[in-house]
Amino acid sequence: MNDITDEQYKQFYQHISHDHDDTLAWTHNRMEGRSELKLYVKGVVDSADLPLNVSREILQESRDVKAIREGVTKRVL
């Protein structure tokens, strides 16, 4: 977490969202010591814990996605 600069957060958000404005805020946290994610105010979630080459249906049923969804909801609220 400490090796990521503010500029890298901003660049990543702009790349993923195709939004050239800076994000309003971001948070970076670990959930239950197992999943690591970054949540951007405008709705981008990044996680290295998710498999890349799977269908949306498989991802929707993934326990990792469920943990991320629950963690993000708690963090935002």
Image: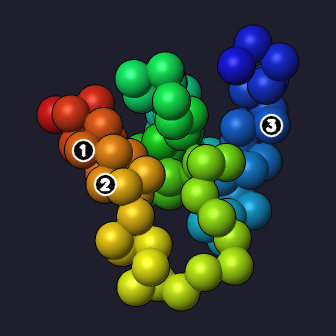
| Amino acid type for the residue under numbered disc 3 | Gln
Residue at image mark 1: 70
- Is label 3 or label 2 in front? 2
Which mark sits nearer the N-terminus, 3 or 2?
3
Mark 3–mark 2 Cα distance, whole angstroms, equals 27 Å
**Mark 3, secondary structure of its residue:** helix
Q: Residue 76, percent across and down?
A: 26, 36
Q: Which mark is residue 66?
A: 2
Which mark sits nearer the N-terminus, 3 or 1?
3
- Is label 3 or label 1 in front? 1
Quadrant of res 62: bottom left
**Residue at (70% x, 19% y) in the render:** 1
Asked whether 4 or 53 is in front, the reply is 53
Q: Residue furthest top?
A: 2
Q: Residue furthest left?
A: 77
Asked whether 29 or 66 is in front, the reply is 66
Q: Which mark is residue 8?
A: 3
Residue 20 is left or right of residue 64, and the answer is right
Q: Residue 50, percent across and down?
A: 59, 58
